Image (spheres, rainbow, N blue to C red):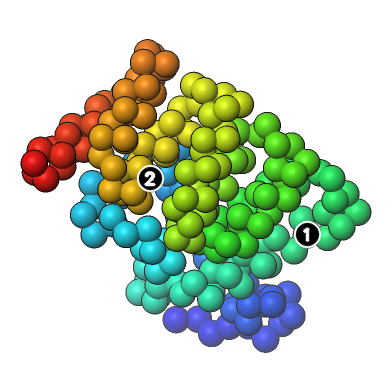
Amino acid sequence: MATASTKPSTSNKTGLPAKQVYVLTAICLCVGLVIGYFFLGTIGRSKASRNPSVGNNLQAPAMAGGHPKLTLEQMKQMADVQASTLLEKSKSDPKNAALLIQIAGIYQASHQFKDAADYFRKALEIDPKNVPARTQLASCLYYSNDVDGALAELDQALKYNPKDVNALFNLGMIKYQGKNDPAGAIAVWQRLLRTNPNLDRKPIVEDMIAEARGSTNTKN
């Protein structure tokens, strides 16, 4: 395996070689994709994922070539590096909500959910009707163990857009997983299907409704 170069241009604040930094950056961005559209859909079928605290223990997949998994601290370092330029820009343009959302997205993709939530909140102070940003804030709160806070943000998002697909799906999922309320989840997902009859991911929602119904029957 090649050794790290000692040239300044090949390293950064993380203390990691630049080549590795680029790989880690790509991994962070890929991992972040599970927190976007239907952010909880992929963990909905995992019984071990019923506890929201799982979000605080997430790690990126192993790197190619046998490199070890990233720790949350490494991911935090990567996020800080990625966000540094945007943070500088925000100092001269503090009312730029889109810029703050970009910064939040970097921390969210790196599983730094509390940091991400702070920036989403700042953006929403400027643009309170931004439903996608509020829905992402809710996901960050959920993964930070603030289930009630997440539900409150989704309820607020739906006041601005009652048919929003992500807000409705996530509201149902958090009721199901975070509040152990399958009946409440079913009601929300049925509302999702009713208000979005041409939903491209209808089978996913129907699967979750069936799972929630099975959970209710098991309890009974």
| Contact flag, marks 1 and 2 (Cβ < 8 Å) | no
In the image as oriented, which residue stretches furthest toward the top? 197
Is label 2 in a helix, a strand or a loop?
Answer: helix
Please tell me which of labels 1 and 2 falls first in the chain. 1
Residue 209 horizontal/vertical position (percent):
24, 31
Q: Amino acid at mark 1?
A: Leu
Q: Amino acid at mark 2?
A: Ile
Residue closest to the eye, 76 or 211: 211
Asked if one can make out residue 42 in the rendered structure from this viewpoint, the answer is no
Identify whether 146 is placed above or below 197: below
Screen quadrant of the N terminus: bottom left
Identify whether 218 is placed above or below 193: below
Taking the spot 68% from the left edge, 32% from the top edge, the residue there is 129
Is label 1 in a helix, a strand or a loop?
Answer: helix
In the image as oriented, which residue stretches furthest toward the front? 220
**To which residue does mark 2 refer?**
174
Residue 87: give its label: 1
Taking the spot 61% from the left edge, 26% from the top edge, the residue there is 160
